[in-house]
Image (tube, grey):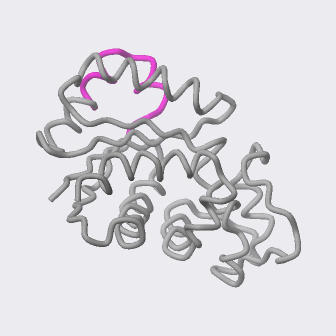
Amino acid sequence: MIKIASIVEGDGEVAALPILLRRLASERAPYAAVNPLPPIRVRRDQFLRKDQEFRRQLLLAAAKSSDDGWILILLDADDDCPATRGREIYERAQQHIPHRRLSVVLANREFEAWFIAAAHSLQGVRGFSYPTNELIQAEIPRNAKGWMRERMQRKKYSEILDQPAFTARIDLQQAFDNSRSFRKLCKEWDAHVSTRT
C-alpha cells in the first residue's frame, strides 16, 4: 500500500485532490494499492517564505507517508513559471526530506485550469456550460476560478463544493491533452505509483 501524503494550499484541494488521486489510480494504475491521505493544508506564503514552517509541514508529510510512501506538494503557480518554481521548491524540500519520495507539481495558474482543460466533459455539471466547438486554452486565463464562474448558470463558484464535484467528473484524458501541468502530475504519478506495481 502506497501512502500518499499531500500538501495543498486551498480548502477545495483538501477535498478534491484525494478524489483525483483515486481516479488516477483507477485509470492509470488499476492494480496499484494506494491510500491518498487527507491533504495537509498550508498557507502558501507562510509555507514558502518561512523556513521553519516549510520544514515542519514537510516533516509532518514524511511522518504520515512512512518510509515507502510518496509526498506530493501541489500548489497553484499563479504568475510563476510552473517548471522553474516547481524545481526550486523541490530542491529546497529535498534538503529536509532527502530520504522520501517527493514530487512538486504547480498547476499552471490555478487548480481550476485543469477543469478548463477538460471543459467539454463538464457540460451540465453544476450548471456549467461551454460550447463543444470552442477551442480550449486551459493555461491562459489568469483567473481560472472566474473563468469557471462565468460559465456557470448560478454565477457562483465555491471551491469547497465545486472543486470536488468537477474533479469527480472531468475527463482525465482531456485534461492530459490540454494541460502541461496536468501532464506533469501524471508523469509524477507514473514515476511514483505506476512503476511500483
The region drawn magenta spans 42-57
Q: Quadrant of the C terminus?
A: bottom left
- 75 shown above or below 120: above
Give residue 153's position: percent from left, percent from top: 77, 78
In the rendered structure, the answer to whether residue 135 lies left or right of residue 191 reads right
Q: Quadrant of the N terminus?
A: bottom left
Q: Main secondary structure of the magenta part?
A: helix
Give residue 13's position: percent from left, percent from top: 45, 54
Q: Residue at x 26, y 47 (%)?
A: 5
Q: Is residue 53 magenta?
A: yes
Give residue 101's position: percent from left, percent from top: 26, 36
- 48 shown above or below 39: above
Give residue 49's position: percent from left, percent from top: 45, 17
Q: Quadrant of residue 173?
A: bottom right
Task: Name the one closer to the observer, 57 or 167.
Answer: 167
Q: Residue at x 47, y 32 (%)?
A: 44
Q: Residue at x 39, y 55 (%)?
A: 14
Task: Name the one closer to the observer, 162 or 73.
Answer: 73
Task: Name the one closer to the observer, 123 or 117.
Answer: 117
In the rendered structure, the answer to whether residue 72 lies left or right of residue 88 reads left
Residue lying furthest bottom: 124
Q: How many marks?
A: 0
Q: Is residue 115 magenta?
A: no
Q: Residue at x 51, y 29 (%)?
A: 86
